[in-house]
Amino acid sequence: MTERLLSHAIAEGDGISLVALVSDPESAREAEANGAEAVAVVGDVASVREATTLPILCFWVNAGTDGLRHADACVVRASDADRVEAGEDLELALWVDDEEQLEEVLERFDPELLLLNGTFETVLDLLADVPAGKLVIAELRETNEALFEELERAGVDAVIVRDRELL
């Protein structure tokens, strides 16, 4: 497998990295052409793998074992993290919704990648408690370019983009 580390893709370069939420090969190709640094797949990970050279982030709850073989990183809740085999070919991004979950994740694991989920305000509140050196991906219910700029200033490394027009 070609090394496609999500952590490298979002840590490199200037500015906040955009991770396009895609569901099929066509939208993955479009995201890559429009400058996304990675794709987050909701759908058939294997078919998206064939369509893009970008790092693929999948969601453990719907990826299945086959999807994990084609992904480069996987979003998983702390309660399920022990059930997923991470390794050289699969990075884990631990999903956090609130302060209690963040505390649990930081106590039980030493994650390099965190996915902070919720409103803009929730993400900013959680970010204040994230130790230096962790890579943070934000998944917001609503996004726009002004929010991207605020997230970047606050220290977020990447944001999942649902709207193709924002790429």
Image (cartoon, rainbow, N blue to C red):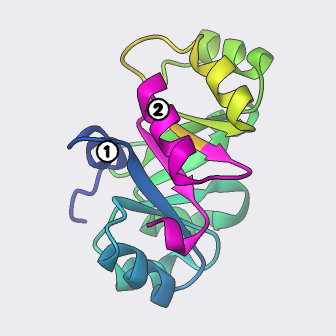
Task: Place residue 158 in its image quadrant.
Answer: top left
Of residue 149 and residue 7, the one placed in the foreground of this image is: 149
Q: Is residue 140 visible?
A: yes
Segment tinted magenta in the rendering: 139-167
Dot 2 or dot 1: first in sequence order is 1
Badge 1 density bin: few <14, some 14–19, many ≥20, Cα 10 Å = few
Screen quadrant of the C terminus: bottom left
Percent position (x, y) of residue 36?
37, 64
Q: How many marks?
A: 2
Element type where label 1 sits in the image = loop
Badge 1 is on which residue? 88
- Name the amino acid type tagged 2: Val
Badge 2 is on which residue? 156
Q: Nearer the viewer, mark 2 or mark 1?
A: 2
Of residue 165 and residue 11, the one placed in the foreground of this image is: 165
Percent position (x, y) of residue 71?
45, 63
Find out whether residue 150 is within the magenta segment: yes
Q: Residue at x 59, y 47 (%)?
A: 75
- Name the amino acid type tagged 1: Glu
Screen quadrant of the N terminus: bottom left
Along the horizontal axis of the image, is 22 left or right of 153?
A: right
Find out whether residue 24 is within the magenta segment: no
Q: Residue at x 53, y 74 (%)?
A: 164
